[in-house]
Image (cartoon, rainbow, N blue to C red):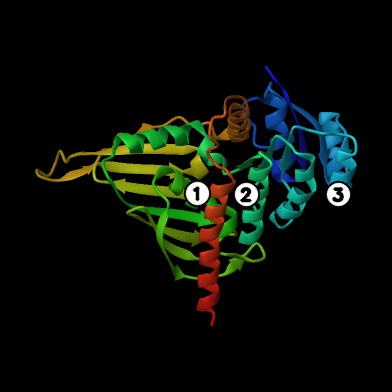
C-alpha cells in the first residue's frame, strides 16, 4: 500500500510538544507522533523559526528541520503538509505550500482568522484537487462516533436542551464544541450572545451564548481559564441524559426510569453506561481518517467548507460582542 510523505510546519504544542516526553502508542496528541506511529505515513521534515524547537525535533526524530518553508521545499516535495503554526499564519503558510501541489493539507483549527482568507483557501484547494482537512479532532474520535450513533437511535429519546461549559475563548476552545454539536445534531439555525464577557488569548471573546442546533437549544457558558480549564457538554433528552465531560475523555449515558419511591415519577437512573473513548490517541485517528480518504475517497468528516461554516458562526459572535460595546 502507498506510503505518504509528510512535512510539519510549526513545532509548538500541537506540532510536537504535547507528547514530546512520551513515547507510547497509547498517547498520540501531536501531528509528529501521529505520523510516526501510523505505518502509512513517513515524516520527512519540519519547519519552525525557533532554533530551540528545531533542536528538539532533531533530537527526538532525527530528521531534517528548516527555518522557513522555502528552505524545506527546495529539498523536499512531501505528499502532505501539516499546518501547525499560530492561527494568524495559516493563510500565509497555505499560500506558500499550495503551489507545490500536495495531495493533502491538514490544517489546525481555526482554518484562518479571516473568513475571506478561509474561503479563498477552500476555493484554491478544491481547484487543485488538494484534500483540505481541518483538525476538529473530536469528529474522528471513536467515542464521538459511537455517541452520534446513540443519538441517531434515540437511546435517550429526543434531545430537548443542552448546556456547554467552556474556557479559553470561543474561538480557541468554544469552537470545538460548536463543531462537535454541528456534527452530533445539526447546523446552527439561531444564535444570540447573552453576555459578551471579556476577551482572552489576545482577541478571543469569552461570551455566554444561546445557540440552536437544528431545533435543539444549547447554552454555552464561559468559565475563566485561570480558574481551571473546562470542556463539558450535557444533553437532556426525553428519555435520558448524555454527559460529554473531561474534554471528551468521559462519555456517560443515564436513562430515565420509574422512581422506586414516588409512584408516577420518572428520574434518571443511578446506573450509567460509559461509551469507551480514545481521546489520548486523538491525533492518530485524525491522520488515519486522512489516509482512508486518500486511498478510498471516503468523504472528509471535517473539510475546509465545514471549517468555514464554523468560522462564520464565530464571526457573528465576535460582531455581536463588538456591537454590545457601542
Tell which of 44 and 243 is nearer to you: 44
Q: Position of residue 25 (x, y in %)?
A: 65, 25
**Residue 222 in the image: above or below residue 94:** below
Q: Which residue is mark 1?
A: 179
10 Å crowding of disc 3: few (<14), some (14-19), many (20+): some
Judge left or right: residue 217 versus residue 99: left
Residue at the bottom extreme, as displayed: 326
Please give the name of the residue rendered at 68% of the width and 48% of the height, measured from the top-left corner.
124
Kindly identify which numbered label has been placed on residue 109: 2
Looking at the image, the residue that sits furthest to the left is 263
Separation (CA) of disc 3 from disc 1? 31 Å
Between 91 and 23, which is closer to the camera in this rendering?
Answer: 91
Q: State which tag comes first along the sequence, 2 or 3.
A: 3
Query: In the drawing, does residue 80 fall left or right of residue 132?
Result: right
Q: Dot 1, crowdedness within 10 Å: few (<14), some or many (≥20)?
A: many
Residue 68 in percent (x, y) is at 86, 47
Residue ID for mark 3: 49
Residue 267 in the image: above or below residue 281: below
Q: Residue at x 42, y 51 (%)?
A: 187
Q: Nearer the viewer, residue 214 or 296?
A: 296
Say which residue appears at 65% left-offset and 32% top-offset. Answer: 28
Quadrant of residue 64 within the rendered picture: top right
Q: CA distance from mark 1 to mark 2?
A: 11 Å
Across and down, in percent, residue 211 comes to 41, 59
Q: What distance separates the C-alpha of mark 2 from that of mark 3?
A: 20 Å
Where does residue 259 sit, x and y in percent of width and height?
16, 41
Q: Split into 4 quadrants, where in the image is the C terminus?
A: bottom right
Answer yes or no: do the residues labelled 1 and 2 have beta carbons within 8 Å? yes
Instruction: Mark yes or no: residue 17 visible.
Output: no
Amino acid at each position: 500500500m502507498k506510503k505518504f510523505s509528510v512535512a510539519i510546519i510549526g513545532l509548538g504544542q500541537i506540532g510536537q510538544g504535547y507528547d514530546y516526553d512520551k513515547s507510547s502508542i497509547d498517547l498520540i496528541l501531536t501531528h509528529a507522533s501521529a505520523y510516526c506511529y501510523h505505518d502509512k505515513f513517513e515524516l520527512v521534515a519540519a519547519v519552525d523559526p525557533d532554533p530551540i524547537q528545531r533542536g528538539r525535533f532533531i533530537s527526538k526524530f532525527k530528521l531534517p528541520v528548516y527555518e522557513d518553508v522555502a528552505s524545506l521545499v527546495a529539498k523536499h516535495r512531501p505528499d502532505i503538509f501539516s499546518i501547525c503554526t499560530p492561527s494568524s499564519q495559516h493563510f500565509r503558510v497555505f499560500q506558500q505550500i499550495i503551489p507545490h501541489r500536495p495531495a493533502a493539507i491538514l490544517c489546525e483549527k481555526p482554518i484562518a482568522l479571516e473568513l475571506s482568507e478561509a474561503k479563498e483557501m477552500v476555493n484554491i484547494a478544491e481547484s487543485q484537487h488538494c484534500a483540505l482537512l481541518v483538525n476538529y479532532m473530536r469528529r474522528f474520535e471513536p467515542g464521538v462516533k459511537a455517541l452520534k450513533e446513540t443519538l441517531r437511535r434515540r437511546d435517550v429519546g429526543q434531545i430537548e436542551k443542552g448546556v456547554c461549559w467552556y474556557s479559553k475563548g470561543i474561538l480557541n476552545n468554544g469552537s470545538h464544541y460548536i463543531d462537535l454539536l454541528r456534527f452530533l445534531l445539526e447546523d446552527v439555525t439561531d444564535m444570540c450572545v447573552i453576555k459578551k464577557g471579556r476577551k482572552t488569548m489576545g482577541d478571543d471573546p469569552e461570551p455566554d451564548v444561546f445557540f440552536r442546533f437544528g431545533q435543539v437549544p444549547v447554552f454555552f457558558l464561559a468559565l475563566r481559564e485561570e480558574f481551571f480549564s473546562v470542556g463539558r457538554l450535557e444533553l437532556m433528552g426525553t428519555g435520558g441524559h448524555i454527559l460529554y465531560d473531561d474534554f471528551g475523555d468521559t462519555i456517560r449515558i443515564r436513562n430515565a426510569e420509574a422512581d422506586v419511591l414516588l409512584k408516577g415519577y420518572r428520574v434518571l437512573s443511578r446506573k450509567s453506561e460509559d461509551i469507551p473513548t480514545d481521546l489520548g490517541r486523538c491525533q492518530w485517528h485524525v491522520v488515519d481518517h486522512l489516509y482512508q480518504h486518500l486511498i478510498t475517497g471516503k468523504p472528509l468528516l471535517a473539510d475546509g467548507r465545514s471549517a468555514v461554516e464554523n468560522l462564520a458562526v464565530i464571526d457573528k459572535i465576535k460582531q455581536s460582542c463588538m456591537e454590545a460595546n457601542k
